[in-house]
Amino acid sequence: MKKSIKKVIIGSIILFSVGFNLTALDSASYEATAFTIQDDASSLMNVIGWKNLKFNKIFGFTNADSSGSGNLALFCHTKKKNVAGLSWEGNLWAESSYNTISAFYGWKDFAVKFDFMERISPTWYLDNFYCSDYKEFAGNASFGYNINKKYAFSVDFGCSYLKGNITQNNTKTNYITYSPAAFFIYTFKDDKKENGKLYVNYSGDFLTRTSVKGKKETVTNYSQNSLALGVRYLNTSSKRFIYAFSAELPADLILGDDIPREIDLNCYISNGLSFIIKPDSVFFNTGIKISLPQVSFIEDQEIKTDNFYCDIYAGFSFLTASSIKIDLCTGIIAGSGITAPDIWNQDFKISISARF
């Protein structure tokens, strides 16, 4: 029973997190370098890095993947030379649909962002069972401040509500989640050839789960607090390629009314390269992300370790004279080897950005 409940809380936290990660608007080139070499799209909806986005009047961005989802974003300068933007992420054409709408505004050294997400499906997976009439709604507000060239921080607060009817055991279930977050970054190196940053990231998820079966109502509370230390490094000194490195050490504390206390330690290391095939025109991007085995300390249990994962990415970027950039990418999770069908069945992603 405890193992089942643990899956419930972690699964619910993931559902909420995915909803807001969609607003990141990651380009295919950024993904192809194992999410290490940031580009213009990385500054979209970014309440800290938004000032890195350079354009004259309008900046547009879109991407799509082979799973049928995609997004659109449009940014412009106001009369006061501030930056305003709107974005949408989702899969409007699917029977089980999700949609995220975000609004952004940046001025001087400040920025704010607001997100709204909905997910509706006639059938979904909840509490380890299939449920009917699944609905999820979430909102989030973010504020960022660039204190100076070295220090910056952001704070977030989100709230989500989801519900579903589990017909297998005739139970109506809903979750209410509150999610505060804070991010602090220190730039220790920044010149024409190198850029290095250290950061600390906190995120919390506090869930209340209510299940009603007949006349019996059961309310349980869970929480997950995560603290991550990370580093990002970019080197553009070579005329043939761009190199980037990132590493993150997250620690999660999971608590709940009917589950044992658990602490999870993780380590992610990524390396990315962008080879210059034709200057200012064609680039080959590749990267590798290594996830070391997770170490879990569970109350009254032996220490547990997870598996080792290695994600490999590759893609191309094409820049045109009309300020249009086209990126292509695919990725493979290398476990016990890679076969030809594994490569063929991978998702492919394309993104397009343009300045006007």
Image (cartoon, rainbow, N blue to C red):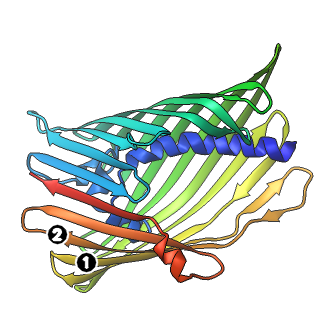
The quadrant in which residue 179 appears is top right
- Residue at coordinates 56% horizontally, 82% vertically from top-left? 339
The outermost residue toward the top is 215
Mark 2, residues whose alpha carbon is within 10 Å: few (<14), some, or many (≥20)?
Answer: some
Q: Which residue is labeled 2 in the image?
A: 319
- Left or right of residue 159, residue 287 in this image: left
Looking at the rendered structure, the secondary structure element under dot 2 is strand
Rendered location of residue 175, percent (x, y): 65, 28
Amino acid marked by disc 1: Phe
For residue 110, which numbered disc appears in the image? none
> Number of callouts in the render?
2
Looking at the rendered structure, the secondary structure element under dot 1 is strand
- Residue at coordinates 52% horizontally, 53% vertically from top-left? 200
**Res. 272 visible in picture:** no
Rendered location of residue 289, percent (x, y): 52, 72
Relative to 59, does residue 267 appear above or below in the rendering?
Answer: below
Which of pointers 1 and 2 lies earlier in the amino acid sequence?
A: 1
Q: Which residue is labeled 1 in the image?
A: 283
Q: Quadrant of the N terminus?
A: top right
Relative to 286, does residue 81 appear above or below in the rendering?
Answer: above
Amino acid marked by disc 2: Leu
- Label 1 vs label 2: CA separation? 9 Å
- Left or right of residue 265, residue 108 in this image: left
**Res. 120 visible in picture:** yes
Rendered location of residue 277, percent (x, y): 22, 84
The quadrant in which residue 45 appears is top left
- Residue at coordinates 21% horizontally, 43% vertically from top-left? 74
Mark 1, residues whose alpha carbon is within 10 Å: few (<14), some, or many (≥20)?
Answer: many
Task: Check contact, mark 1 vs mark 2: CB within 8 A.
Answer: yes
